[in-house]
Image: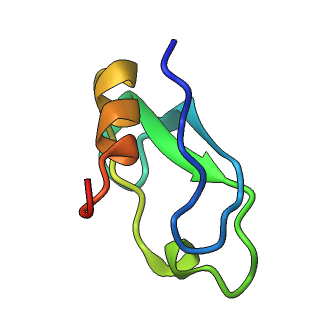
Amino acid sequence: MTEMKPCPFCGCEIECRLMHDTETYGFPMRYFIMGDHEWDCFLEHVPMVPYDDKEKAISTWNRRVEE
């Protein structure tokens, strides 16, 4: 499995989790990017995007603008 890069805003560790999300998006199971964000981390205020595929979620997360 591909290793995930840390949060570009606060540096916290990130992981990709398979979760139920029927209330918000209406899908039975999706992968979400989650982390142990600091309270002042920008990502605390960004909605989580669901992914059907774990590798797609990780590769999207790992993509950086400056690269």
Q: Is residue 14 left or right of residue 61?
A: right
User: Residue 39 location, x and y as percent?
Assistant: 74, 82
Left or right of 55? Residue 35 is right
In the rendered view, how is the structure colored?
rainbow
Measured as percent of width and height from the top left, residue 52 is found at: 28, 25
Q: Quadrant of residue 56?
A: top left
Relative image position of residue 11 (x, y in whole percent):
66, 64
Viewed as shown, does residue 22 lie left or right of 45?
Answer: left
Residue 23 picture location, percent across and down: 43, 51
How many numbered callouts?
0
What's the residue at 51%, 12% (across, down)? Answer: 1
Within the image, what quadrant is residue 55 found in? Answer: top left
In this view, 11 is above or below 13:
below
In the displayed orientation, state which residue is furthest to the front. Answer: 67
Name the residue furthest bottom: 40
- Residue at image position (38%, 46%) is 61
Going 40% across and 33% down the picture, which residue do you hit?
Answer: 58
With respect to residue 37, does 60 lie above or below? above
Q: Which is nearer the eye, 50 or 58? A: 58
Q: Residue at x 57, y 32 (%)?
A: 17
- Viewer-closest of 5 and 57: 5
